[in-house]
Amino acid sequence: MNFTIAAEILYITQPVLSRHIKVLENEIGVKIFMRTRQSV
């Protein structure tokens, strides 16, 4: 999964996309992605 490409498609920056995903995960109480230092 590449957040940078997804962000480009949505016409937003990668940090904004990451923040939105974290907010969604917090709201629903479930981790959507497994994150490591090198990948999602």
Image (tube, rainbow, N blue to C red):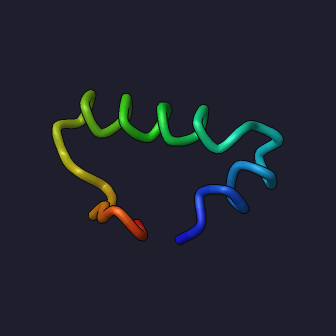
Farthest front residue in view: 37
Image check: 20 left or right of 24?
A: right
Closest to the observer, 23 or 38 = 38
Q: Quadrant of residue 15?
A: top right
Q: Quadrant of residue 23?
A: top left
In the rendered image of this protein, does residue 6 appear above or below residue 28?
below
Image check: 8 left or right of 30?
A: right
Farthest left residue in view: 29
Return the x and y of residue 18 as percentages of the image width and height: 50, 41
Return the x and y of residue 24 as percentages of the image width and height: 37, 34
Quadrant, the C terminus: bottom left
Q: Residue at x 80, y 52 (%)?
A: 8
In the rendered image of this protein, does residue 3 appear above or below residue 26?
below
Image check: 20 left or right of 22?
A: right
Return the x and y of residue 1 as percentages of the image width and height: 52, 71
Q: How many labels, in total? A: 0
Q: Residue at x 64, y 44 (%)?
A: 14
Return the x and y of residue 30 as percentages of the image width and height: 19, 46
Q: Residue at x 75, y 37 (%)?
A: 12
Q: Quadrant of residue 13?
A: top right
